[in-house]
Image: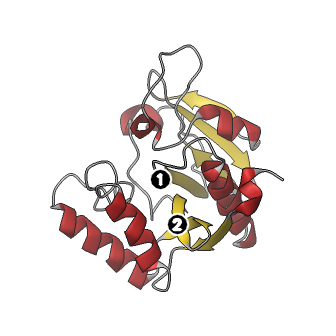
Amino acid sequence: MTAEASYRTRPLTAETWDDFAALVEANNGVWGGCWCLGFHPEGVKTGTVSEHREGKRAHVEAGTVHQILVYEGDDVVGWCQYGAPGELPNIKNPKRYEQGNDSPPDWRIGCIFTGSRHGGKGVARAAVTAALEAIKAAGGGVVEAYPEQVSGRPPQRGAYFHTGPEPLFEELGFVRDRQIAKWRWVMRRTV
């Protein structure tokens, strides 16, 4: 039995908000206060941490967020955010992204987060796998992710991998489409 097998997943909803918020608050608002709002239309370029929190909560209450939470027991230990491009329009390196963007995806995988005590234990894999299952259940289509290349570069701290490491997506059947930064790739898969 793998570590992943002990995890269960649930969508982020008003019912699971407190579970999500507990993990975010235990991790300084996630990367200094993002509250997993960076990919959403309003992003995090302005505003306070509390405004980001309320912005994320408003998305949850309005049903304009797709996010899979990973639980170990009663505690959320990570997540994977996904959504249609209109729901998650903000990606890093947008000018480079648009070069060669001949066919927009149906879905995007935004950020992936694992709590500090759970790194390397399969949380991200469980989250992305469940997100792909949810995408398939919603009709599927072309899914894009924007992971960081890990081979050929110095070790990085986890914050650099907020879109996940490339090997994870390779293992889940994604293939490179195009490079959009020195270490960042557009990867695609159809589900």
Residue at point 47% right, 32% down? 99
Q: Quadrant of residue 147?
A: top right
Q: Earlier in the sequence, mark 2 or mark 1?
A: 2
How far apart, in angstroms, are the residues tagged by discs 2 and 1?
8 Å
Q: Amino acid at mark 1?
A: Gly
Q: Which quadrant would residue 151 be assigned to in this image?
A: top right
Q: Could you say whether the residue bearing mark 2 is in a helix, strand or loop?
A: strand
Quadrant for the C terminus, please.
Answer: bottom right
Q: Is residue 146 visible?
A: yes
Q: Nearer the viewer, residue 120 or 101?
A: 120
Q: Mark 1: which secondary structure? A: loop
Amino acid identity at mark 2: Val
Q: Position of residue 161 (x, y in %)?
A: 47, 38
**Residue 83 can be seen in this image:** no
The residue depicted at 62 percent of the width and 52 percent of the height is: 123
Disc 2 to disc 1: CB gap under 8 Å: yes
On screen, 25 above or below 169?
below
Compared across the picture, whether 135 is left or right of 27 comes to right
| Disc 1 target residue | 115
Farthest residue in the right direction?
Answer: 1
Residue 142: mark = none
- Percent position of residue 110, x then y: 49, 52
Disc 1 crowd rating (10 Å Cα; few below 14, some 14-19, many 20+) is some
User: Does residue 68 appear left or right of residue 42 in this picture?
Assistant: right
Residue matched to label 2: 76
Q: In the rendered view, would you say 21 is above or below 182?
A: below
In the picture, measured across the screen, residue 8 lies left or right of residue 27, that is right
Q: Judge by depth and name the residue closer to the eye, 62 or 26.
A: 26
Horizontal and vertical percent position of residue 108: 55, 54
Q: State the residue at coordinates (77%, 59%).
A: 5
